[in-house]
Image (cartoon, rainbow, N blue to C red):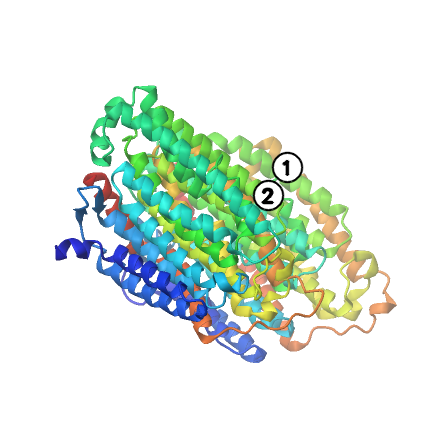
Amino acid sequence: MTGFPILSAIMLAPGVGMLLILFLPHDNQKAVKWISLASAAVSLMLTLYLYIQYDRVVGGFQFKEEILWVKTWGIYYFLGVDGINLPLVLLTSIVFFTGIWTMWDLTKRVKEFFALMLLMVLGVYGVFMSLDLFFLFVFYDVSLFPMYPLIAIWGSTRKEYGALKLTLYLLAGSALIVPGMLYLYFQSGINTFNMVLLANHGFTPQVQSIGFFLFLFGFGVLAGLWPFHTWSPVGHVAAPTAVSMIHAGVLMKLGAYGILRVGMYLCPHGLVEWAPLFSTLATIGIVYGAFVGLAQTDLKYVIGYSSVSHMGLVSLGLSTMTIGGINGAVFQMFAHGIMTALLFSSVGHVYDRTHTKLIPELGGMAKVMPRASFFFILAALAGIGVPCLASFWAELLVFINSVKVYPVLGTFAVLGLVVSALFMLRVVQKTFYGEKNERHAHAPDMGWAMTVPRAILAGTIVLFGFFPRLMLDVINVGVMPLVEMIK
Amino acid sequence: MLAKFLLFMPESVYLAMGLVLFFVCLPRQAQPRNAFRWAVGFALLGIVAALFGLFREGFLFFEAYQVDLFSQIFKLILAVTVLLVLFLCRELPDLERHYRREFFLFLASCTLGLMLMVSAVELMTLYLALELSSFSLYILVPLRKGDGIDVEAGIKYLFIGVTASCVMLFGFSYIFGAAHTTDIRELMMRLPALLQQPAAVIGLLLFLAGFFFKLAVFPFHFWAPDVYEGAANQVVAYIATASKAAAIALLIRITALSHGQSPYLFKVLIALCVASMFLGNLSAIAQKSLKRMLAYSAIAHAGYVLMGILTMTAVGYSSAVFYTAAYMLMTFAVFMVIVLIAGDGHNPQIAELAGLHKRAPLLALTLMMALFSLAGIPPTVGFVGKFLVFAAAMQQGYFWLVVVGMVNATISLYYYLMVIKAAYLLEPAVEQPMIRLSPAVRLLNYILILAIIDLGVFPQHILWLAESSVKNMLGGI
């Protein structure tokens, strides 16, 4: 570890913000919001610097920070980024910053909201950066438990049910992760939770098979893997805007990242063994999400089920075990995160102004709220996979490789995408065009200040749509060694 | 002589405390406040003595009494717990006024009994110490003002306690018959060879019953819900913390006697562990009363501790010691909130917590942290405790036991979340007044929150103490 601990700084900026907020008086809402935004800005700036500074030629783990934490158990505070988690850190920073900004108008229990939000983001950074299994799990839970109050207090539509279901599902996933990590720890016999050391040490095929199975379902719950996805649409719908953004945009990626980093990295052989099951569940998720989404009338449910479908794509990409497929999966995590955040952010605005998110009650919103509509439609197009938007490249890579590896499943997945295109277009048509509902004719559009966070998200989608290599080069150096290990 | 006295310092303090309080109790018209001041003074002194004696070693009373790091750590835990509990006893609104002085007296005698218990290395001494603490508690439980549920609880506690004692003595006779000694150090050498005989195993198991009772392990758990419900809040705070800590210490000491040589003992322990976890957690879900829920959750936690102990390895024992320290901290935090909410000393219902985040934001925060810690959510001390216990079990290859433990942790999260939901989300039907907290109580709250998180993030020191104490015990007996 040399020089400035930039990863710790990115991760702890929200933590410092949270502590500052806790010591502020209750009525000082402006200060709470400014502190939150400032800490998000610090994280974002440092992440951009990190992203530019990362050496794409050398690859591997960079900016490492390693401190021995508990000697007898071999627990390290060990942070580092490679091509796989760097895009996800960037994703977190962007969604976090825009999410805080989106919640600027919040008036209910402001201090607690932002404190919990910052705590959650600290956990998310921790999961993405930790290369120590113990800390990864600790951060994993830290990022999950603030969800309960965040949804239950500030949410809408069946919020208590949604919050409870989500929390119990996700922590039930932990019930598999803990045995999994302890199992690997003792099987390795080298007395360390350091994942790099564990991966180099290697495990017997049988151990890998058990380990991968536990991680696949433990993390798979959070990744929205069918049939453990049911918490996800309910939770999305119940959550307040910024929480939906972070939740669908970032938290679900934690699950996929867990499968990738812990499951595939430590147990590559296990992936080979379980790939048929994994890819089948992923494909069912894609098709199922698309068809259920077709029947929804609540905008947030539509996005929720499209998330299930799109996260299925990520899983399918991972299960192809090819460089292209995993590249696509990681890229899809990033692209889908930004895109979903933009969708929820736009819907959040519509809901705040019209107090409804039911499609039949809306209509012709493009004339009433041109800016909000523009962002929603852009994100919806990205989801469908329109060229020149970030998701296009990601989905293309996943499809090409999945059809190559699993011809039948791949074809179903492509069909699933067609259906999801259908329902997205249907939503766009019914909500934003068509008959104008006079009740909402005078609902105000986004102010310019509130346009900025959405513009940042939209800009990111377009930027990486035009220049996918900005990201794919980074991802590729991370994925290549992984695929070597699988082979 | 002086050196011997120094070894006995912590116990002497509580002995003196009992004597002084006895005389305070004698006059007809004395103030309970006086007894409280004496008790706090002695409790502070007790902590100093326990810290002072932490690294001392030696034998007393014809080698029936051993002072080692293992016993001293538990004495420190006990001393801290007593002081914390006394923090809540400034007013004792739900005790009859003329019994309030006696409350402190029996608290002192019970603590003395527990302290003697953790150091006793001779079975007879051990039994006497156990009874000293139990009898004090039999009196403390029905001291409450009220309509008879306290007496019912007291009688239940007495009957089940006495039964457990009988079972224990019966087992004791078997052990003595098989090994011809009552000295734990000699037993340690002789028992492994004898464990082929059913009599020795059964004796050992029955002997453990006394501690299962104290810890509320299935099937000796029946008293827990009624006693938690019936006894005064402060008394329950004490029973739920101090008395359990000592029981865990002894469970570890006695289980260690078998050297892990007996598969029967192991099988029984595993069954009790799983049954306690499921019974506790599933019953807790249905509870409406906060204290009753905590009673069932305590049964479940006894199961987790047992998981560390039944591995019969040094790692497992030290994880159980760590878990004990963690459990004391978080359980006390919850009971502190209960005492402060129930200003007049009634039994708070979970629904009564509604609006707590407005009435007392700090208490709500403490409650949330303590409950998350009990549920084993990182980065709290409770998580580290669970993690260590599960790791110890996994090390011995008990994969399914760990899975069962994690499933239980998830179940327990549900009812803890229900309490947090009440405190943070529900609005009270009738507007409740704010709860005023004195600066001392505020400080205590901050310390507890900080400790719960701090020990969760930096567990090294306590872990080191736990590990060296267990090493010391296994080598020393």
* Labels 1 and 2: the sequence-earlier one: 1
Left or right of B50? Residue A39 is: right
Q: Can residue A336 be seen here?
A: no
Q: Which mark is residue A284?
A: 1
SS for tag 2? Answer: helix
Residue B120 image position (x, y, % from top left): 27, 43
User: Label 1 sits on what residue type?
Assistant: Ile
Whether label 1 touches label 2, CB < 8 Å = yes
Residue at mark 1: chain: A
Q: Which mark is residue B440?
A: none
Q: Nearer the viewer, residue B186 or A17?
A: B186
Residue A229 image position (x, y, % from top left): 62, 44
Vertical relation: A427 (above or below) B274: below
Q: Nearer the viewer, residue B283 or A15?
A: B283
Q: Residue furthest top?
A: B197
Q: Quadrant of the C terminus of chain B?
A: top left
Left or right of B466? Residue A364 is: right
Vertical relation: A135 (above or below) A280: below
Hey, which quadrant is residue B87 in on the image?
bottom left
Q: Quadrant of the N terminus of chain B?
A: bottom left
Q: Residue at x 47, y 41 (%)?
A: B216
Alpha carbon separation for disc pair 1 and 2: 8 Å
Q: Which residue is under mark 2?
A: A312
Hey, which quadrant is residue A1 in on the image?
bottom left
Vertical relation: A202 (above or below) B344: above
Q: Can residue A274 be seen here?
A: yes
User: Label 2 sits on what residue type?
Assistant: Gly
Hey, which quadrant is residue B433 in on the image?
bottom right
SS for tag 1? Answer: helix
Left or right of B33? Residue B180 is: left
